[in-house]
Image (cartoon, rainbow, N blue to C red):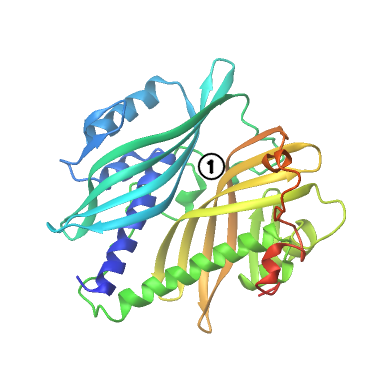
Amino acid sequence: MSAISNHATKQEILDLLYARARGADRFDPALMRACHPVDGTDNHGTYQGLMHGFIDSLEKAMAAGPICLAKEHIIANALFDFLPNGDVFVESYHVAHETFVQGDGTVFFHIGGRYLDTFREVDGRWLIQHRDIVYDWSRVSSGPLAFPGTVAPADLRGTRTADDPLYRHTSRGRLPAAPDRTGDIMTDPVQRLLDKQDIAEILYRRARAGDRSDAELAHTCYHEGATERHGMFDGTAAEFIDVVSFTKPKPGSPIKGMMHFITNILSDFADDTHAFVESYHVAWCQMTDGTDATIGGRYLDRFEKRDGRWGIVHRDVIFDWSRVEPETEKFWDKHPAKPFLFGKRGADDPLYEYTVRGV
């Protein structure tokens, strides 16, 4: 395979990994099944056998309970081996956040591990032929799901049903579009890879802008006139950045420190200049009231390419789960004499020794 073909295969497989996570998190059995051939197999710890049989067992468990309120599978660190028989082996890291009803409360599972997947090309597209799930660490916590009623209106909250906001933009059971392999491999597939990289970097810059309180940078991620729905806010992205949020530094911010982790980016192109993009995020926030807030959700973004530049024209911020817990002792408190570099929400952050704010 050529280097370009290898890169296109890697991107198709990454999209499939993200689609498989979407299927589990939105409880979309048709989508989960579409990611595996009918003879695909699974070693899931609690189950060994045909993957379609495992999905059948999930449907039975969903009907019998306990109720799963939220799931979010974050995928990262994908490494590829192209095998002599034409298959592709991929190790990918994942962190799963799962919240279930337990008695009068909830239980929260935090599981870290890896997928050891063998991909096989079936009828012109890559599917997961075999999956081993490796468990590396986990944490179980009890407590209520911290979803205050003021966080977001109902149509911006994630669900595990067909009512999830994602399905205003796409259909349940739908795999990402397979690349057109009938065209010129040197043009369309390459441009699509470049477009996806451009879009990903805009998502990363928007996260940087929020975390570093860099309003000028945040504005560059949108096209003029872009709109945003974020919590109870519904208006222009510019107003959210400059007035409503604390992206522009201002007194009275309830946030001491913040980090947005972006992953599972699935881009669905309507044509060469329009794309719908779902991306996952986890936000860790150190609050001034002595609590640590963790929020898991998704961005549902409409992107347009204008004058050769991709930008967001509308963003819905979806809240899937959250936890608010008392702040604990910090790791670095155990080493008071060491010269740690600490993140700052402003121009004093160590980042700006290497790059310029607003760029």
Quick one: which residue is furthest to the right in this view? 251
Reading the image, the residue beneath label 1 is: 158
| In the image: residue 5, left or right of residue 254 | left
Residue 294 sits above or below residue 277 on the image: above
Q: Can you give x and y, in whole percent of width and height, for residue 279 in the image?
A: 50, 55
Residue shown at the point (23%, 29%) measured from the top left: 48
Residue shown at the point (25%, 77%) measured from the top left: 185
Q: In this view of the protein, can residue 269 be seen by the observer? A: yes
Q: Can you give x and y, in whole percent of width and height, for residue 94 in the image?
A: 43, 44
Residue 115 sits above or below residue 107 on the image: below
Q: State the image quarter where residue 188 is shown.
A: bottom left
Q: Nearer the viewer, residue 186 or 337?
A: 337
Residue shown at the point (41%, 54%) measured from the top left: 170
Q: Nearer the viewer, residue 351 or 325?
A: 351
| In the image: residue 32, left or right of residue 325 | left
Q: Nearer the viewer, residue 84 or 236?
A: 84
